[in-house]
Amino acid sequence: MNLLVTIIAIIFVPTAYSEPAWCYHDSNCDDTTWPSKFSKICNGSRQSPIEINSSLAVGNASLTVFNFTNYGDTSTIENITNTGRTVEVDLKKGVQISAGALSDVYDSLQFHLHWGNGTSVHGSEHTVDGMRYPMEMHIVNTKTVYNRSLTAASTDSTGIAALGFFIEAMPGNSTGSPAAWNTLASYLANITLSDEKVSISPAISLDDLLKGVNRSKYYRYLGSLTTPNCSEAVVWTVFKETIKVSQDLINLFSTTVHIGNQSTSALMTNVFRKSQLSNGRVVTTQPTASRASKIGFSLGPMALAWMLLRV
Ligand SMILES: *[C@@H]1O[C@H](CO)[C@@H](O)[C@H](O)[C@H]1NC(C)=O
Ligand SMILES: *[C@@H]1O[C@H](CO)[C@@H](O)[C@H](O)[C@H]1NC(C)=O
Ligand SMILES: *[C@@H]1O[C@H](CO)[C@@H](O)[C@H](O)[C@H]1NC(C)=O
Ligand SMILES: *[C@@H]1O[C@H](CO)[C@@H](O)[C@H](O)[C@H]1NC(C)=O
Ligand SMILES: *[C@@H]1O[C@H](CO)[C@@H](O)[C@H](O)[C@H]1NC(C)=O
Ligand SMILES: *[C@@H]1O[C@H](CO)[C@@H](O)[C@H](O)[C@H]1NC(C)=O
Ligand SMILES: *[C@@H]1O[C@H](CO)[C@@H](O)[C@H](O)[C@H]1NC(C)=O
Ligand SMILES: *[C@@H]1O[C@H](CO)[C@@H](O)[C@H](O)[C@H]1NC(C)=O
Ligand SMILES: *[C@@H]1O[C@H](CO)[C@@H](O)[C@H](O)[C@H]1NC(C)=O
Ligand SMILES: *[C@@H]1O[C@H](CO)[C@@H](O)[C@H](O)[C@H]1NC(C)=O
Ligand SMILES: *[C@@H]1O[C@H](CO)[C@@H](O)[C@H](O)[C@H]1NC(C)=O
Ligand SMILES: *[C@@H]1O[C@H](CO)[C@@H](O)[C@H](O)[C@H]1NC(C)=O
Ligand SMILES: [Zn+2]
């Protein structure tokens, strides 16, 4: 009898263990458990996200504009997937970023979103001056030398470049706008369960989704992936201007997609990691004109004219 139990146990134990999975909702796998359950790196000293304090951001004139390659191409966005922890859109080969004070050309692999619970409970990962936004979009990029492998790129302290865009509600009561976000959000109804994936058409481009954001104004700091294994391999760019979408589109995310593969499983809400310690890290940004003119005034009109020409 004991032998039989042992044999059954030996046969069944391996299938009884499911893949260890990190999560946001359950205290057995949420972000407080990541350092002990998934990777010690999650308790490292350059973790993300962080609270950005704009008055402490250091001006740095090398933070120039980016070169976005194929961001206007409407054939690069193909599928949208419910991963059980986010909604992710994979990008075709050929989408890239460079310049913007990055050391290399990076391949844009995918973008995904973080959110709270509709427009009322904000769920961006980064905060600025204590402000958490309703949602945050992350475009994940890896140095071309790593051939689109996130795992390979995560062994290099600047192997990954992440672009963060805050999303907030448009003023007023407009619905279903802008059109590109309406198209994207309309597919949520097709991926209500985890692991569901559908193709997107009519085609939309990344530029369509980022419309209205001046991409030459941003914060820069060195951090990590905000999900396990939290690799400290990320050059973060957090844009100052927000993407504005109508309230109904923001609300769709927290009311449509589920974290599991049963319609009875919980809705996907509050899918963001808590703020991490900055540990003395410096956030840089473009030098401000007001600061230059303040210096200019104290130096006199000739100096002011000189400063303005240089800004
Ligand atoms: C994380 O690091 C802090 C201080 O560095 C330490 O007190 C804590 O025990 C660590 N937690 C884990 C789970 O390793
Ligand atoms: C300015 O930014 C560039 C690019 O990130 C960096 O290499 C340089 O060290 C920064 N300069 C200062 C003074 O922080
Ligand atoms: C932008 O990047 C592409 C390759 O990704 C390159 O061919 C092009 O010359 C770059 N343009 C500028 C203005 O740097
Ligand atoms: C989209 O999904 C199809 C079918 O699973 C797959 O063949 C294709 O590679 C996916 N496209 C991207 C850009 O991941
Ligand atoms: C999200 O908000 C809805 C009402 O707007 C509420 O019923 C629900 O319990 C909230 N979910 C969580 C996880 O707080
Ligand atoms: C930002 O830094 C300034 C200067 O240290 C401080 O007075 C202010 O309270 C900080 N703001 C936040 C939101 O932490
Ligand atoms: C890059 O990855 C592709 C597909 O994953 C593979 O076919 C190709 O051989 C790889 N190239 C290099 C240089 O590793
Ligand atoms: C996890 O972290 C280790 C150590 O930095 C790294 O070698 C590995 O590639 C990472 N794995 C993934 C999937 O990011
Ligand atoms: C939005 O709708 C509410 C309720 O219907 C209304 O009270 C409010 O005036 C509207 N605001 C605008 C800017 O149209
Ligand atoms: C998404 O769902 C709608 C409504 O059920 C359906 O008409 C449409 O064909 C679906 N689209 C895809 C790409 O599966
Ligand atoms: C974007 O911001 C930069 C820096 O403030 C400014 O020079 C430029 O004109 C702005 N571009 C647009 C399209 O507003
Ligand atoms: C649903 O999820 C469970 C556990 O997460 C898994 O064992 C099962 O295979 C999944 N079913 C389908 C149809 O994907
Ligand atoms: Zn993210």
Image (cartoon, rainbow, N blue to C red):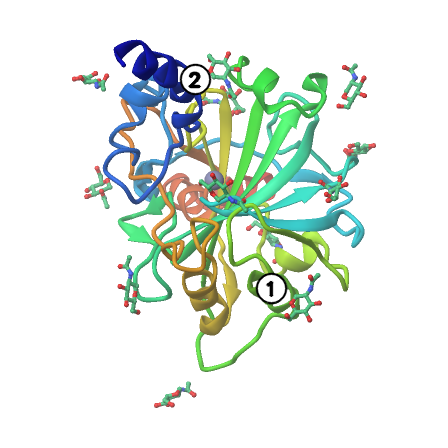
Give above or below for 25 relative to 150: below
How far across and down, in percent of the image, does residue 301 sit?
Answer: 47, 47
Q: Residue at x 34, y 51 (%)?
A: 270
The residue type indicated by label 1 comes to: Trp
- Residue sitting nearer the eye, 195 or 54: 195
Distance in Å between CA atoms under marks 1 and 2:
49 Å
Q: Quadrant of the N terminus?
A: top left
Left or right of 62 in this view: 258 = left
Q: Residue furthest front?
A: 1
Residue 181 is marked as 1
Task: Name which quarter of the figure residue 204 lies in.
Answer: bottom right
Q: Quadrant of the C terminus?
A: top right
- Residue sitting nearer the eye, 80 or 104: 80
Task: Name which quarter of the figure residue 2 lies in.
Answer: top left
Q: Is residue 287 visible?
A: no
Q: Residue at x 45, y 21 (%)?
A: 231
Dot 1 or dot 2: first in sequence order is 2
How far across and down, in percent of the image, does residue 155 sit?
Answer: 53, 13
Residue 221 is marked as none
Which structural element holds mark 1? helix
Where ligand 1 lies, by image quadrant?
Answer: top left
Residue 11 is marked as 2
How far across and down, in percent of the image, does residue 211 sit?
Answer: 63, 60
Q: Residue at x 38, y 54 (%)?
A: 265
